[in-house]
Image (cartoon, coloured by chain):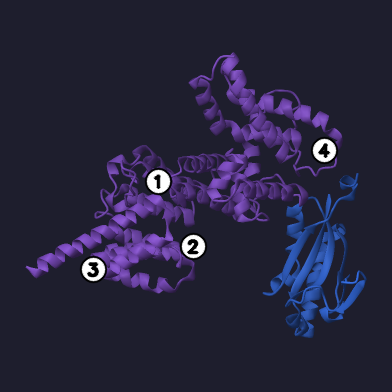
Chain colours: A purple, B blue
Amino acid sequence: MSGLSDDVVVALAEAHRREWASVLTATVRLTRDLDLAEECTQDAFAQALTTWSEAGIPDRPGAWLTTVARNRARDLLRREAVLRRKLPQLVMDDVLPVPDDDRDPAPAVADDRLRLIFTCCHPALSREAQVALTLRLLCGLSTGEVARVFLVQESTMAARITRAKRKIATARIPYRVPSADELPVRLDAVLDVLHLVFTTGHTAPLGPALVRDDLVDSALRLGRLLHDLLPQESEATALLALMLLTGARRGSRVSDSGGLVLLADQDRGRWDRGQITEGVGLLVGALGRRPPGRYAVQAALAAVHAEAPSWEATDWGEVVALYDVLRTLWPSPVVELNRAVALGMRDGPAAGLAALDPLLDEPRLATYPYLSAARADFLRRLGRPDDATAAFEEALQLTDNEVERAFLRGRIDEVQASRRDEGAAGSL
Amino acid sequence: MAKYLVLIYGDEQQWDARTPDEQETNHAGHRAFAAAAGVRVVGGEQLEASSTATTLRRGPDGGVTVTDGPFLETKEVLGGFYLLQAADLDEAIDLAGRLPELTTSHGAVEVWPVVDLSTSMS
């Protein structure tokens, strides 16, 4: 056996990113059981590592993986036929013939991935289970990786995923794209799950790195899939635009030394212009179709920032106006906080500070570090260094992300240094 | 096809305070539900007040202890149930979602899948 070549490792990683969900859903058609299909898909990828190293990378890796996974499923089904008959099967509409040979099941596969998304994000499952299943089954993250996203033990996550899959089978949550009248509500849950995956990757809640590229990429890939399969759903298009426009700033949010760089200080030359152009194009299409939804307005906000030449030259009037629309579509204390920050940019730090005041009593923001950080920044700009320091320290206590903590400590040092300078100047 | 037990909960005091008109509206809602569900209703009953319920449990001496009242003393009590037959959870949710108790702010409905003995017993 030849050693593992880089080519094989790269090809396998690429196939994992692109083909995991397709291989899994093609296998589900045969097994009618998510667990078994997942096991066979995993086996196929393990088999690929050996076979591709020996016999070379196949021309169509996806088709190769699908064939291997389905053969494995047939073996297991034959061997465990008696046992399996007693297990509840996934509720599936038999609108499509189940291909029994090894013909490429491609035409049915795209639809099947959509079915799987709606099954994973069914409202009868908890939001945590929805996100976990989506990451595991559609993005192909290992249980350990999903556990790290949620900051729980792998055994805890394994139990959570098993429980959710059991509920799908036992309570008969169907493997189906909802009917037209149900679709808007059900799609909202899918979009929220995708957005949550994206934001979790964009600013990891804990750990050494600010951005988790794998999660951002997973969310983007699913966002593209959803937009491609449901092109008429403008909120799906808008969410993809939002993720592209926000993700375009990825390369400039962390400095070369690993420090956090605020939107205000980012090198806009490092923003991904191709991604911004694509995001703006999608957004224009989504806005043209119907009254904008929550994601369209959020994408419009991201577009204003993406197209502004600098922080100072941002159209803050437009930003505040968009937040005024957003707060009616999606009333949330976080929206109020961002609106207050924009107001402070438009009308000055005193106005911003005043707009933040009512949020201090908001219980949902009690542990939210960005409120303290926003107050601290306005206090700093108002020349109140002691109050600013106290607020920065409050924010520091509330965040566990190391990059953000380093940034806040830096700000405290800056404020203290400027106070000493002023003190020295005053005593002259 | 699968069976689902649909449990109807609500605030008993608010149920008791209903006017005859409100009660009739509720009954009409159940008749409409039954008409919509048709043969998918396997059975269903309204329950008497929770104060008439009796709980049995194994006592410390190994015998059965009988006590007054339901197992859990909560404001929300079980007021009735249906046993439904449905193709999947979406159909069961669609049917249960038509129950008139859900038009009141205190009502809640649980949907429980029933064990299918034809596949689960060895």
Q: Are marks 4 and 3 on the same chain?
A: yes
Which residue matches tag 3?
A382
Left or right: where B68 falls relative to A343: right
Kindly report which numbered mark, 1 or 4, lies closer to the viewer in this rendering.
Answer: 4
Q: In the rendered view, would you say A110 is above or below B9?
A: above
Which residue matches tag 2?
A330
Q: Nearer the viewer, residue A377 or A352?
A: A377
Q: Give the residue type that dot 2 points to.
A: Trp
Indicate the secondary structure of the residue bearing disc 1. helix
Q: In the rendered view, would you say A410 is above or below A43?
A: below
Badge 3 crowding class, 10 Å Cα cut-off, few under 14, some 14 to 19, many 20 or more, is some
Q: Write the residue at 27% across / 50% down.
A: A265
Subunit that carries the residue with mark 3: A
Q: Give the residue type that dot 3 points to.
A: Leu
Q: Is residue A288 visible?
A: no
Which residue matches tag 4?
A84
Q: Earlier in the sequence, mark 4 or mark 2?
A: 4
Subunit that carries the residue with mark 4: A
Subunit that carries the residue with mark 2: A
Image quadrant where one finds the C terminus of chain A: bottom left
Q: Give the residue type that dot 1 points to.
A: Leu
